Image (spheres, rainbow, N blue to C red):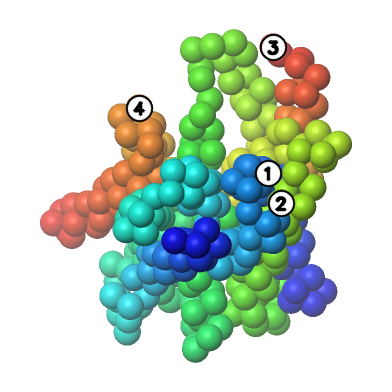
């Protein structure tokens, strides 16, 4: 098969497969958005998913090897303390990210 | 502030996460030997971070289309759960709604469920602006990576921590709103278990388990009352 043709077919197949995973609930629960169980999930799923995304984004951390996740821990601590103190999302995220970049690029805790 | 301005402000952390990640993808993609513009084209048509990284391996191995479809579907199947909690939020119709659903990444879901437009602004337009801005950041990253590849001088390593920090901040925002430990505790438990036992499918397994435990609680409450 022509190489560019193969590439474009892969794009098409992936686009459709991804879209279907995102579309399924909207089709399956069409007209049932106000069912009490779905409203309940709408309220309690976001906090659970946010917690899971924090864990997921740290999944490649190896806590058994130096520096034992200390960069991530300190950066998240800084982000959280700033956020609980000032309540400014951008400030908390920037401070945490800049600290993290500086820490890993200059190897503070290697 | 305009609706788009408010959405931009809320999505700046995603900009700092998506551009370096998109660039990493573009650089990896470049090694396959295709023209640079196919990287942003993929970001435009497929728009799924993890799946695009996976596709580089599949393309290199000339995987069959069936294999591509199946592995994409499995990798992204966690997105099925996202929509369940958005049914009452997405009230736009037609093409607008289809685009909101098409662009439902982890980060877009997080912003839509945890931030609000300023008073007096239309929520649906705010959601649309968030979705479109996030995709723009991702496509831009893919294009930069594909175009400039490894010749980029600025060291961006660690910049994608912005997404971890974003999830952390949005988790705290959820806590301020809800003040109930149950969903957080359930997620922590399920997340750590899934990381330990099913690392490759961590999100799918842990979201499924968490929903089961959340639903179990309503059932227990019903029986108790």
Q: Which residue position holds label 2?
A: B146
- Secondary structure state at the residue bearing disc 2: helix
Q: Are marks 3 and 1 in contact (CB under 8 Å)?
A: no
Q: Which residue does the image show at 25% across and 51% down from the upper left?
A: B212
The label number, if any, that marks residue B196 in the structure image: 4
Chain bearing mark 4? B
Q: Which residue is mark 3?
A: A110
The residue labelled by disc 1 is: B27
- Label 3 or label 2, whichever lies nearer to me, is 2
- Marks 4/3 same chain: no
Between label 2 and label 4, give the one nearer the viewer: 2
Residue A22: x and y, percent?
42, 66
Q: Alpha-carbon distance for marks 1 and 4?
A: 31 Å
Q: Are marks 1 and 4 in contact (CB under 8 Å)?
A: no
| 3 and 2 marks on the same chain | no
- The quarter holding residue A26 reads bottom left
Disc 3/disc 1 C-alpha distance (Å)? 27 Å
């Amino acid at each position: 098969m022509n190489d560019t043709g193969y590439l474009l077919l892969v794009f098409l197949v992936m686009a459709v497969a991804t879209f279907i995973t995102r579309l399924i609930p909207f089709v399956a629960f069409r007209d049932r958005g106000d069912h009490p169980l779905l409203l309940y999930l709408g309220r309690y799923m976001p906090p659970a998913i946010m917690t899971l995304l924090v864990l997921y984004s740290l999944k490649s951390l190896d806590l058994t090897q130096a520096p034992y996740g200390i960069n991530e821990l300190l950066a998240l601590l800084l982000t959280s303390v700033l956020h609980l103190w000032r309540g400014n999302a951008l400030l908390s995220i920037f401070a945490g990210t800049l600290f993290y970049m500086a820490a890993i690029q200059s190897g503070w805790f290697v | 502030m305009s609706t788009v301005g408010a959405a931009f402000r809320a999505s700046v952390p995603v900009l700092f996460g998506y551009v370096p990640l998109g660039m990493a993808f573009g650089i990896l993609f470049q090694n396959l030997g295709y023209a640079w513009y196919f990287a942003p084209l993929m970001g435009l048509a497929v728009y799924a971070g993890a799946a695009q990284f996976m596709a580089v391996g599949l393309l290199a191995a000339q995987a069959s289309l069936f294999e591509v479809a199946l592995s994409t579907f499995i990798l992204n199947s966690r997105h099925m759960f996202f929509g369940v909690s958005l049914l009452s939020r997405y009230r736009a119709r037609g093409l607008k709604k289809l685009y909101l659903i098409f662009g439902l990444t982890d980060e877009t879901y997080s912003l839509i469920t945890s931030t609000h437009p300023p008073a007096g602004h239309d929520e649906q337009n705010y959601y649309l602006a968030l979705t479109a801005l996030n995709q723009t950041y991702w496509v831009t990253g893919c294009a930069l990576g594909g175009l400039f590849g490894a010749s980029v001088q600025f060291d961006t390593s660690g910049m994608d921590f912005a997404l971890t920090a974003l999830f952390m901040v949005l988790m705290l925002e959820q806590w301020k709103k809800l003040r109930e430990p149950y969903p957080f505790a359930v997620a922590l438990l399920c997340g750590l278990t899934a990381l330990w036992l099913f690392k490759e499918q961590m999100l799918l397994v842990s979201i499924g388990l968490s929903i089961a435990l959340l639903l179990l609680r309503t059932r227990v409450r019903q029986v108790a009352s």
